[in-house]
Amino acid sequence: MIVDDVPKNLTILQHALAKDHEVFLCSSARECLDHEARAQADAFLLDVNMPEMDGFELCKLLRDFPDVENKPILFLSALDSIEQKMSGYEVGGDDYITKPYDLREVCRKVNVHLERAKNLMKVEQQKSAAEDIARLALQQSSEMGVVARFVEGSANCKNYEELANLTIGALTNFGLSGSIHIRTREDTIDISDNGWPSELEVKLLEAAVGKGRIIDMGLRCILNAERVSILIRNLPSDKEIHGRLRDHLAILLTGVSARISAIEAEDYLRLQQDHWVNAALKQVCGALSVIKGKFEEHDSQTTKIMDTLMQDLELGMSRLVLSEEQEDYFLALVDNSMHRLVKLYHSGVEIDRYFNEVEKELEKIINENVC
């Protein structure tokens, strides 16, 4: 159902949407409220600026009808301020399309919200089967028990996704529906209790950063901390319960914020530790390379000494007039020394083999850490 006081706009939108949908046209808010097909409509496109009753007022009245309560309502407006968008969200709107609009974008958003409404209906049907069990569980555990379990569970969260899902679980235990927006140093994480937040919710959460600790929007609100924002869609109308839950949510927000800082610190320390380990391993590899070089130099010098000794011995034997017994004595002495030198040389080769194995293992560890 499209509501716009400008006939030309109705014609254009009807032409764009009629290919995939049955379209009802209304030229005023009153005509929409009285239209016999209002209950049949699966989604509503409302112009904001209309005489007598604007789109925001119409949306509030439509939300009072049980047959419209959970159906998508999208606003069309030339005004693009965050205040206008927050006003639309506060009265129950699901999206806000700025004029002049691209008709393909309008069709896409209508289809997305219709699909989302269909999925939400399935979720609600699944939830209804478990509501009795959930209600009984909530009766057995106090609200502070929910907070205590969250604080205990958050200490075991290893990453932001686990923390976001734990927070959504705590909201569910309070009987609340909402979304969470976490701002890490590299990225943002958005998670909702129905799988993913709408585009409008994401924009509102982003726009709410730095706008105060708590932003009230009727029975909806946004809670802000430095690195996280939480949107609540269905605070109870009972003032006492409303106030009590807001206090619990403030504690929850503080816990989420503290755990985000802790996860960041743990990640930083892990990176530093890996850096230190890699630096130490590289130093060890460097030292092993030096030692290996020394052993190679030692082996080379040993070989040279053996060659020089043999040459000197041959030269000396040729110049000396020795008896056969003397020659045998010197040859036996040299042969014994040569055997010891050969043994020492082989020992060096064995040590070199062990160093090669150690060096390969250290290089493997370094490469794995770098990867």
Image (cartoon, helix red, strand yellow):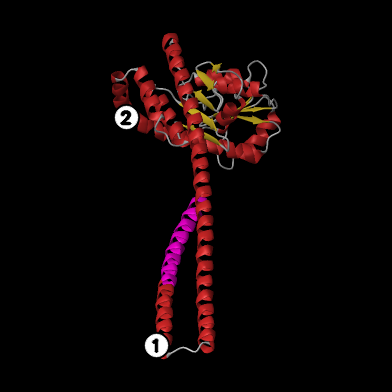
Q: Give coordinates of residue 175: x percent, y percent.
A: 39, 22
Looking at the picture, how far across and down is residue 111, in whole percent? 55, 38
Asked whether residue 366 is drawn in magenta, I would say: yes
Q: Which residue is mark 2?
A: 130
In the image, residue 371 above or below residue 324: above
Q: Is residue 173 above or below residue 161?
A: above
Measure the C-alpha gap from mark 2 to mark 1.
108 Å
- Considering depth in this image, is 337 or 218 the residue closer to the camera? 337
Q: Is residue 320 visible?
A: yes
Mark 1 lies on residue: 325
Pointer 2 local density, CA inside 10 Å: few below 14, some 14–19, many at least 20: few
271 or 137, which is in the foreground? 271
Element marked by disc 2:
helix
In the picture as drawn, the residue positioned furthest to the top comes out as 240
Label 1: element kind: helix
In this view, the residue in front, 21 or 123, is 123
Span colored in magenta: 344-371
Q: Main secondary structure of the magenta part?
A: helix
The reply to whether residue 236 is in sight is: no
Name the quarter where the N terminus is drawn. Answer: top right
What residue appears at the point 41 percent right and 29 percent down from the top-left corner? Answer: 154
Task: Indicate the position of residue 161 as horizontal and vertical percent values.
Answer: 46, 36
Can you tell which of label 2 and label 1 is closer to the viewer?
1
Horizontally, is 154 left or right of 218 in the view? left
Indicate the amino acid at tag 2.
Answer: Ala
Instruction: Say which quarter of the image contains residue 308.
Output: bottom right
* Few, some or many residues within 10 Å of mark 1 (<14, 14–19, 20+): few
Q: Verify whether residue 258 appears in magenta.
A: no
Amino acid type for the residue under numbered disc 1 = Glu
Q: Report the front residue among 149 and 71.
A: 149
Q: Can you give x and y, in whole percent of width and height, for residue 109 in the image?
A: 58, 36
